Amino acid sequence: MFNYLYGEIVDFGNGIVVLDVDGIGFELNASSYTIADCKMGQKQRLYTYMQVKDDGVALFGFSTTDEKNMFLRLISVSGVGCKVALAILSGMDSNSLALAIYNGDTRSLTKIKGLGKKTAERLVLELKEKVIIDAADLVMPITQNPDIQINKQMRDAIAVLCSLGKSQADAERLVDAAAQLGATTAEELINMSFRIG
C-alpha cells in the first residue's frame, strides 16, 4: 500500500522509528542499520512494508531499497516472519547478508543473534538461487565497453548486485571497475564492488 513515507524523525530506538508525516506520527519497526541512519529532527524517506494480521497492522521501515528488497526475500522463506527477518537485518547489513547467502556461509549467518543452524541452512537453500537468478533476466552483457569479455563470474556478480537493487548500468560499471582492479571470482568482484560503490 505504501512504497515509502517522507517526514521528520521525531523519535527512534529499541527497534522503532517514529516519523512525523504532516502531523501524523507513523511508528515503524526498523533494523539497527536503519535506526543508525536516523537523525532526530531530520526529514527522511523510509521505504515501507505493511504487515496485516488478524491481531493488527504493523509498518516496517527501511533506509534503503536494498534493505527492503532483502527483507522481502527473507520473509519469502518458510518459517521466517517479519520480526525474524528484521532481527536478521539487524545482525548483518543487506550486502553482507546477500554475500553470505551466495557463498553458502551458514557459519557467518549463525553468528546473528537468534538465527539457528537450521534456519541459516534454509535461507541458503531457498535464497541462494534467487540472489542470482531473480536478476538474471535483467542482466545483459556489459554494453558500455564492447571490448570487455564478460565471463560467468562477472555475470553472477552483476546479477547479485542487481538483485540487491542496483541498476544494471551501475552493476556493470562496478563489476567492470572491480575486474580492472584484479578481482576475478564472483565473490571478489562483489566484495570489491561494495567497496567501490
Image: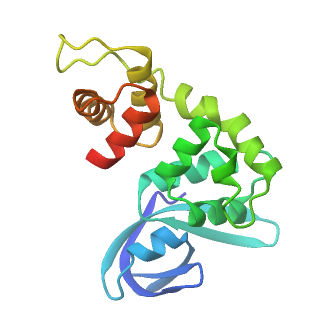
Out of 76 and 158, give the one closest to the viewer: 158
What residue appears at the point 59 percent right and 53 percent down from the top-left corner?
A: 71
What is the total number of numbered labels drawn onto the structure image? 0
The image quarter containing residue 181 is top left
Furthest residue toward front: 182
Q: Position of residue 84 (x, y in %)?
A: 71, 62
Out of 172 and 192, give the one closest to the viewer: 192
Q: Position of residue 35 (x, y in %)?
A: 47, 76
Examine the rendering and report whether any part of residue 197 can be seen: no
What residue appears at the point 70 percent right and 66 percent down from the top-left corner?
A: 83
What residue appears at the point 69 percent right and 46 percent down from the top-left corner?
A: 106
Q: Position of residue 90 (x, y in %)?
A: 58, 67
The colour scheme applied to this rendered structure is rainbow
The image quarter containing residue 28 is bottom right
Q: Going by the image, does 180 lie left or right of 183?
A: left
Q: Going by the image, does 147 lie left or right of 132?
A: left
What residue appears at the point 33 percent right and 40 percent down from the top-left corner?
A: 193
Residue 53 vertical position relative to residue 181 in the rendered view, above or below: below
Examine the rendering and report whether any part of residue 70 can be seen: yes
Residue 42 vertical position relative to residue 51 in the rendered view, above or below: below
Residue 79 vertical position relative to residue 105 in the rendered view, above or below: below
Q: Position of residue 26 (x, y in %)?
A: 51, 79
